[in-house]
Image: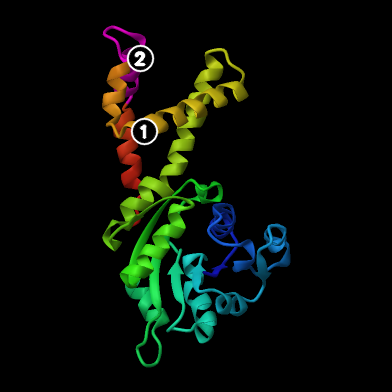
Amino acid sequence: MKISVIGAGAMGGAMVEGFVKSGMLAASDITVSAPHETTLERFKSLGVCVTTDNKVAADAGDVVFVVVKPWLAEQVINEIKPVIDYNRQTVASVMAGISSSKLKEMLAGEDGLLPRMFIVIPNIAIAVKSSMTFIVPVNAAEEDTTAMSALFEATGGQMVIEERQLGAATALASCGIAYAMRYVRAASEGGVELGFKARDAQKIVMQTMKGAVDLLQANGSHPEDEIDKVTTPGGLTIRGLNEMEHAGFTSAVIRGLKAGMSK
């Protein structure tokens, strides 16, 4: 499989890094395009093929990821559309807010023919093979979806979902990674108040979060089951949890997630 990534911004760049690190394909089988040579320098050093011509990139990939801002979607797709082989290539949109109907409208050939298509929403942690990526098949066979799922399983975790779930998925994972980082910041600041140096406090908080995730994944348990193991009657942990709840912790998280859903 050869992959092209059109757009080397924060997300496109993170995807390229993740694909290289995944070991699923050789760096030379990845092509990335961006308007400026300077943007492409770091990818060239990874052994990735680089170009400032979106059409060259689009022609090179079996799977073509379009990773640009939504207001550039039509311009970029119109640019690459003439070189897409509708019988051979797959086009994957990594553009927030671009619906499947809009994608079909932009990519439809004169004869109504459509390429295989997906909507794909990773998060920025794909750069370190720790993304939670959502895949929406738009015009794809089961074997196409299986191949796409395998690619993103190698860069973290993946889930095939329905398009109606995209808003919630984005809030939980794409926006959600920022929410998790805000907790790290808040807890680290608390650690400084408790007497640790800032860097040490952050190290403690990050390892503690990793431990919580590892426990839940290893045991397949509900968070409350693990919480019950460390909250002794009258103990400090339950006091701390109750203070957070009095301040609206759970409610604030739910409200934040709902606010982060795309309309």
* In the displayed structure image, the side of residue 110 where residue 56 appears, left or right: right
Residue 87 % position (x, y): 42, 84
Say which of marks 1 and 2 sits in front: 1
Chain part drawn in magenta? 230-247
Q: Residue at x 40, y 33 (%)?
A: 213
Q: Is residue 212 magenta?
A: no
Q: Secondary structure at mark 1?
A: helix
Q: Secondary structure at mark 2?
A: helix
The image shows residue 79, relative to residue 24, as above or below, that is below
The image shows residue 71, relative to residue 130, as above or below, that is below
- Residue that numbered label 1 is attached to: 218
Closest to the observer, 53 or 160: 160
Please identify the quarter of the rendering in which residue 196 is found.
top right
Type of amino acid under label 1: Ala
Whether residue 161 is visible here, answered yes or no, is yes
Please identify the quarter of the rendering in which residue 30 is found.
bottom right
Image quadrant occupied by the C terminus:
bottom left
* In the displayed structure image, the side of residue 108 where residue 51 appears, left or right: right
- Residue that numbered label 2 is attached to: 237
